[in-house]
Amino acid sequence: MSTQSEAVIMAASAQFGTIDYSRWQAVRWQWWSYIRYPRAGTTELNFFGQVAGQTGVTMQDTNLPKAGSFGQTHFLLKTISTDIRITNNDADGFTNANYATLDTQTLASDYLNGFVQAGLFTLNIGARPFATVPKPFLYLPPPGNDVDYENSYSNQITAVPTTGTTNVVGLPFATQIRSRKNVYVCDPNILIEAEQQFTAKISFPSGLVPVIATNVVSTDDVTTNPLKIGVIFDGVLLRPMQ
Amino acid sequence: MNPDILNSLQRRFGSADFSRYQIVRGQKYDFVRLPTVGTPSVSFFSNPVGASDGTSGISKTYEQTNLVKNASFGQEYFALTQIRCYANFVPQARSGITTGTNFVFRGYTALANSAMEKLNDLLHTGVLEISFAQKLYYQINKPFIMCPPGFGIDVSSLGSSRTGAAQETQVSDTNWRVQPDWRAESVYNIDPIQIIEPEIQIGAVINFPDANTPNFSATALTTANATADPVVEVGLIFDGYVIRPSQ
């Protein structure tokens, strides 16, 4: 004898439920997850494994409702991005005395010749790979568009550069490419169903890549300047109507 | 065994559904280290993950290639839509060079044979040839120019500096860095797209017929004018669609 439980639940949901599962709403949405990149480097960083509210995890770090899944909503993944942020991107103190190490003040060396030039991004949904991308900080640049930088080269120590005089000209400053046109598009899009488990990670199987700007990046999360890297999924959130 | 029986078994007990295919954007890539003293050609997709890099002897990981089989993409179809070529220095931590916290590939134009000058030479030379099943499909001159990677770093300023050495008669902007075009719109698009069937033999090589690649040994490297042997890797990336059976 078959049970009537499913029909009963549907009838009860239709009459008394708070959600209408027969109609769905689509909203553009981003999910993000930032975690600390250790100064000594690491073999693997797993994203979307924490939720906001955990110790040391704020909404700036992640907006995920549930570790490892998007909870009770579907998500149509359209673009994948990485991002790098540091609390104090200090470019002050450009003097004659420190010119030899100044580029580390802004992580420029790390962008040009550090972990930013390495790594492997993998996205598995269930146990199946859906993305395997080398050099993710380059291949999967951040979303949005950059702020507008101008450099006046105003920190010249001597008024007129002459042979044999130590001087510095300009601040070292480098970032990831931030342009809407460069964002990595998942074409065709990837639908991640509700409660579907997924893993997103950046690994360094060829060896650790320590931070070069060690005088800027703090050793842990609680001091002033942790280096955090993030993965951002942009797409369409699909949720039942209320 | 009769093919019909195989089909029947596969439908009932198989781990993949070959009647339905899934399409996912994907890349097939291979990064190879250049010999420091130069080379007349660089081959790609010949050493799978786990094999040794032909130059360095270091075991290749998924950071260098996702090739799982020598010279073939295995049991997947791949629809090739873009060709991207990459060349740059490997990260400091992997180059075997210790220069302290400050690591700048010197590009002062006054310094002969600087690291950036040599990299610039590399980017403006070469002929890329790609063949499938021994048949030539693509022959592209100056591949790093014609087929740039479409990704890179946004450098607002390199922070020129000088140490006072006599050869560095410096004015503003003399410190420079070179990278292939980072704009996604600049990549080499394949139109019509090229389907690469499973197990097809792939040959991909960049030849340098005029002269070997630059000799990077004893290159001016740091702000202290120290020289070193920077390690350069070149890469070939096929961007497109992985076409695989549903599960």
Image (cartoon, coloured by chain):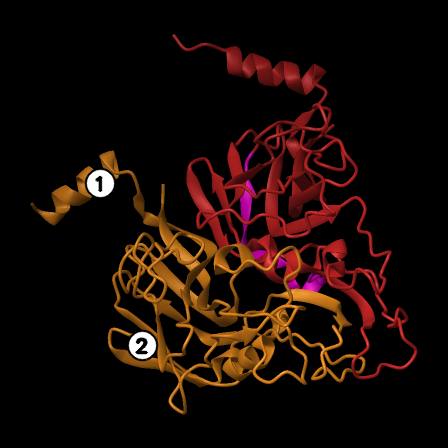
Residue A187 visible to an observer of this rendering: no
The residue shown at (76%, 72%) is B160
Residue A161: say if magenta. Answer: no
Q: Where is residue B5 in the image (x, y as percent from the top left)?
A: 13, 42
Query: How many labels sit on residues?
Result: 2
The residue nearer to you, when weighing B167 against A47, is: B167
The residue shown at (36%, 52%) is B244
* Label 1 crowd (10 A; few <14 / some 14-19 / many >=20): some
Query: For mark 1, what is the residue?
Result: B10
Q: Position of residue A112 (x, y in %)?
A: 63, 62
Look at discs 1 and 2 and give the one toward the viewer: 2
| Labelled disc at residue B131 | 2
What is chain B's hue in the picture? Answer: orange
Which region is colored magenta? A176-193
Circle 1 marks a residue in which chain? B
> The C terminus of chain B is located in which quarter?
top left
Please tell me whether residue B52 is drawn above or below residue B37 in the rendered image: above
What is chain A's hue in the picture? Answer: red
Please name the amino acid that badge 2 sits on. Answer: Ser
